[in-house]
Image (spheres, rainbow, N blue to C red):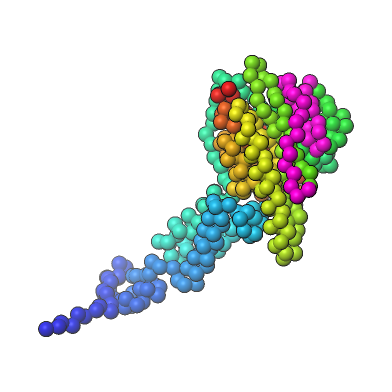
């Protein structure tokens, strides 16, 4: 014999203010708030956000997931991921301006969801890094600086001041043709062993060899990095100065709604990074690579050189975002980190930081590193 099971359509809630017993329809709980029939106090409400709030939240989180997966897999593997590397990632936090207050008013029990999305955006997506202070190790430690000086077009005196403030043992420049002709820069580098080759300047307080060129050309276009051997006491290490192909032409095409330029531009830069990584892998002893890689650390143009057994100094011992480019764009503030110091497994990074923003389109990057595993 079958029994008919009655499905409840309402529940009884007692008002905490006046004690009135109210019968609340279950369907009303799913839709929103329900108030006491006697005094008007809220006695029940849905813990689910309304559709008009849930829909943009789901869309926001979906976009963050797509970008996060793209960055993890390799953003240059598709055109939007390649272009997105050079966008201010702070734009993905803007939905929180509306969504967070809405959750605080209408759906507090779900407030942690948009808060987690915002923290992910401000943290991993934007490249936030935090490290604990490290005391200089007893091993030999040096101060290294990399700087795309943009030929001193924003003031060679400012470039010289950055050198004096950082007081590096080794400084490497990119886009620095004729920069040594400036009396400001020449004075700041007095006492350094200096080598120049095209756009590169290598200056060291330690003895260094002649410059060797490392071929990173592509499709008939000549590009090269430089390599010198640095003698530090009873040991030595290889030192690379690098400037990879600029993404500018690809981004200009992208703004004109043409994705082909950014596909080609990205392919050429990643090819350069692969050639550079091969050369770096041949150095079995201590080595340092500095320069303008024209890629954030999530990009393959950074990850290929790092796959040769190198680590990014700011990722290991920096604090904050460490952005090194953007202040002379329409954004008006640094918003992307494309200048890097990479070290082999023989080094321990004690500290890494960025310099001033006035003297070049790029910001200098400095690091204190200790040689702990000399070969």
Which residue is rendered at x = 60% and y = 44% of the image? 303
Judging depth in this view, the residue of 18 and 184 nearest the camera is 184
Q: Is residue 293 magenta?
A: no
Q: Nearer the viewer, residue 297 or 365?
A: 297
Bounds of the magenta span?
Answer: 191-220
**Does residue 36 appear left or right of residue 181 in this picture?**
left
The tally of labels here is 0
The image shows residue 98, relative to residue 357, as above or below, that is below
For this orientation, the residue located farthest to the front is 220
Q: Residue at x 59, y 37 (%)?
A: 308
Locate residue 100, reporting x and y percent: 51, 61
Can residue 176 be seen here? The reply is: no
Residue 190, image x and y in percent?
81, 23
> Residue at the spot x=61%, y=35% of the render?
281
Residue 267 x/y as whole percent: 68, 52
Q: Quadrant of residue 21?
A: bottom left
Residue pictured at 30% horizontal, 67% vertical: 16
Q: Position of residue 246 (x, y in %)?
A: 74, 49
Residue 89 appears in which quarter of the rendering?
bottom right
Q: Is residue 371 above or below residue 3?
A: above
Is 96 positioned to the left or the right of 239 in the image?
left
Q: Residue furthest top?
A: 234
Q: Is residue 218 highlighted in magenta?
A: yes
Which residue of the protein is positioned furthest toward the left in this rendering? 1
Height in image: 189 above or below 54? above
Given residues 120 and 239, the one toward you in this image is 239
Residue 209 visible to the viewer: yes
| Image quarter hosting the N terminus | bottom left
- Lateral position of residue 79 relative to residue 209, left or right: left
Q: Quadrant of the C terminus?
A: top right
């Amino acid at each position: 014999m079958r029994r008919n099971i009655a499905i409840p359509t309402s529940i009884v809630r007692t008002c905490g203010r006046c004690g009135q017993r109210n019968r609340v329809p279950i369907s009303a709980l799913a839709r929103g708030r329900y108030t006491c029939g006697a005094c008007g106090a809220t006695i029940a409400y849905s813990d689910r956000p309304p559709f008009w709030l849930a829909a943009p939240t789901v869309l926001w989180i979906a976009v963050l997931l797509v970008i996060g997966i793209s960055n993890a897999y390799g953003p240059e593997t598709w055109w939007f991921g390649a272009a997105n590397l050079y966008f201010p990632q702070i734009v993905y936090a803007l939905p929180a301006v509306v969504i967070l207050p809405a959750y605080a008013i209408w759906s507090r029990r779900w407030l942690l969801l948009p808060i987690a999305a915002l923290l992910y955006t401000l943290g991993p997506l934007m490249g936030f890094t935090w490290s604990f202070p490290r005391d200089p190790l007893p091993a030999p430690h040096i101060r290294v600086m990399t700087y795309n000086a943009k030929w001193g077009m924003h003031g060679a005196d400012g470039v010289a001041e950055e050198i004096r403030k950082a007081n590096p043992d080794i400084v490497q420049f990119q886009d620095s043709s004729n920069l040594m002709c400036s009396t400001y820069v020449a004075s700041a580098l007095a006492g350094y062993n200096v080598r120049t080759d095209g756009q590169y300047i290598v200056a060291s307080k330690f003895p260094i060899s002649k410059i060797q060129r490392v071929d990173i050309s592509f499709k008939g276009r000549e590009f090269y990095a430089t390599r010198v051997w640095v003698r530090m006491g009873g040991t030595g290490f290889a030192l690379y100065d690098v400037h990879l192909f600029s993404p500018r032409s690809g981004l200009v095409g992208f703004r004109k709604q043409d994705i082909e330029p950014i596909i080609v531009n990205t392919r050429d830069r990643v090819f350069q990074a692969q050639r550079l990584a091969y050369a770096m892998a041949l150095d079995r002893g201590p080595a340092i690579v500095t320069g303008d890689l024209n890629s954030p650390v999530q990009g393959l143009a950074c990850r290929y050189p790092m796959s040769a057994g190198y680590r990014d100094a700011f990722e290991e011992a920096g604090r904050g975002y460490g952005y090194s480019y953007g202040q002379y764009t329409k954004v008006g503030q640094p918003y992307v980190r494309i200048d890097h110091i990479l070290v082999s497994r023989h080094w321990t990074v004690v500290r890494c930081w960025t310099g001033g923003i006035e003297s070049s389109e790029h910001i200098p990057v400095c690091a204190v590193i200790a040689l702990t595993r000399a070969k």
